Amino acid sequence: MAKIRRNDTVFVLTGKDRGKRGKVQQVLPKEQRVLVEGINVVKRHVKPRPPVVQGGIVSQERPIHISNVALLCPHCGKPTRAGFRFLEDGTKVRFCKQCSQVID
């Protein structure tokens, strides 16, 4: 069970986008990277492919290392670490280490 998942809101800790917030679009567990909306945007020079793609300079997000982002708690609104606990019915859930509220 991953501590950061798709559609989580994260806070960027390091890099050129430090201090920004964004929503996780994709998690790449093997590379330990996450793709965050509006973060780590680079410009790519794209060659035109006539039926589909128009050529030019295109901006796109690139994955950022998972250690450079922190999960934002939806309850307290602070960047936090996530922990795991089991509820009474036996389901495993994430919780905020600062305010102890269940995340999800």
Image (cartoon, helix red, strand yellow):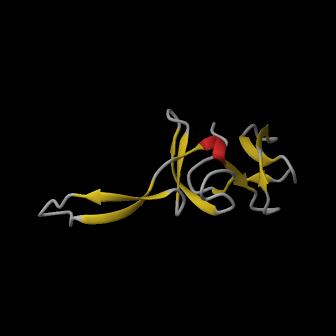
Percent position of residue 14, x then y? 66, 50
**Looking at the picture, does residue 47 appear above or below residue 64?**
below
User: Residue, x 29% and y 58% (percent of image)?
Assistant: 45
Name the side, left or right, on which 52 lies relative to 10. left
- Front residue of 18 and 86: 18
Query: Is 24 on the left-hand or right-hand side of 81?
Result: left
Whole-percent x and y of residue 11? 68, 57
Q: How many marks?
A: 0
Residue at 72 percent across and 40 percent down: it is 91
Residue at the top extreme of this rendering: 30
* Residue under the point 61% across and 59% down: 17
Image quadrant where one finds the C terminus: bottom right
Q: Residue furthest left?
A: 50
Q: On the rendered structure, is 45 left or right of 41?
A: left
Which quarter of the rendered picture does the N terminus lie within?
Answer: top right
Give the image quarter of residue 81.
top right
Relative side of 31 to 90, left or right? left
Q: Nearer the viewer, residue 19 or 2?
A: 19
- In terms of depth relative to the viewer, which is nearer, 12 or 44? 44
Examine the rendered structure and indicate whether residue 55 appears above or below residue 81: below
Q: Quadrant of residue 52?
A: bottom left
Q: Nearer the viewer, residue 26 or 70?
A: 70
Q: Position of residue 44 (x, y in %)?
A: 34, 57
Residue located 76% across and 57% down the image: 73
How far across and how far down the image is residue 57, in percent?
Answer: 31, 65
